[in-house]
Structures are given as C-alpha cells and as structure tokens.
Amino acid sequence: MQEIVTKVLEAEKEAQQRIQEARNRAGEIRAQADQEVQGKLEQAREQVARRVQEIVEQARSQAQAEYDKTLQQSQEENELFFEQHEEKIDRAAEAVMQLITTPEWSS
C-alpha cells in the first residue's frame, strides 16, 4: 500500500513538473511570437513611411511640373499680349510721357 501511495505521489510530482515545463515553454513561445510580431509591425511601419515619402515626393514633383508649365504658359501669353498690343502700349506710353513732360502753363 505504501508503495502505491509513493508511486502516486511521484506521478503527481512528475505531472506537476511537466506542467511547469509546459508553462515555461508556452511563455517562451509567446515571448518569441510577440517579438516576431513587433518586428513585423516595425517593418510594416517602415514600408508605410517609405511609401508615404515616395507619394509625397511624387506629388511635389507633379506640383512643380504644373507650376513650371503654368508659369511658362503665362509668360507666353504675356509676350503675345504685348506683341499684339504693342502699338497701343507705345501710344499710351507716349501720351503719359507727353503729360509728364509738358508744363501745365503751356496748354
């Protein structure tokens, strides 16, 4: 009878030891999984940051190209306007010069 009780106690002790080992191993697995998840999250954050930077640079480049195009177009339109209205501008400039250089009492 004593032998049976001893064997049962030894079996219980061994079972508790295995349970503790399993808990320890489960904790290690959870810690490793958490670490892997954190690594993957960091990689994802870095990828997102790079992609956002690429998008911003692309938008900046497109905006600069549009600005340059619009500026060029405006300059061409201004040149065309002055070419088309050169006579009128010259006459207006002469009239202003005449007003400025002619004394009031000479009229």
Image (cartoon, rainbow, N blue to C red):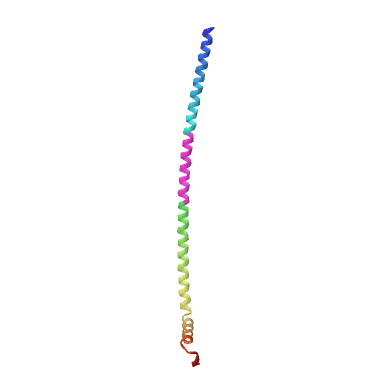
**In this view, which residue lies farthest toward the bottom?**
106
Residue at the image point whose x is 46% and y is 55% from the top: 58
Total marks in image: 0
Q: Residue placed at 50% from the left, 24% from the top?
A: 22
State which region is magenta.
33-52
**Depth check, front residue: 101 or 92:** 101
Determine the main secondary structure of the stretch shown in magenta.
helix
Looking at the picture, how far across and down is residue 80, in whole percent?
46, 75
Q: In this rendering, is residue 71 above or below 57?
A: below
Residue in the image at 48% along x and 78% along y: 84
| 34 lies above or below 85 | above
Q: Residue at x 47, y 48 (%)?
A: 49
Q: Position of residue 1 (x, y in %)?
A: 54, 7
Q: Is residue 85 above or below residue 7?
A: below
Residue 35, percent across and down?
47, 36
Location of residue 51 in the rendering, given as x and y in whole percent from the top left corner: 47, 49
Looking at the image, which is closer to me, 5 or 45?
5
Direction top: furthest residue: 1
**Residue situated in front as seen by the camera: 86 or 13:** 13
Q: Does the magenta run of residues contain 39?
A: yes
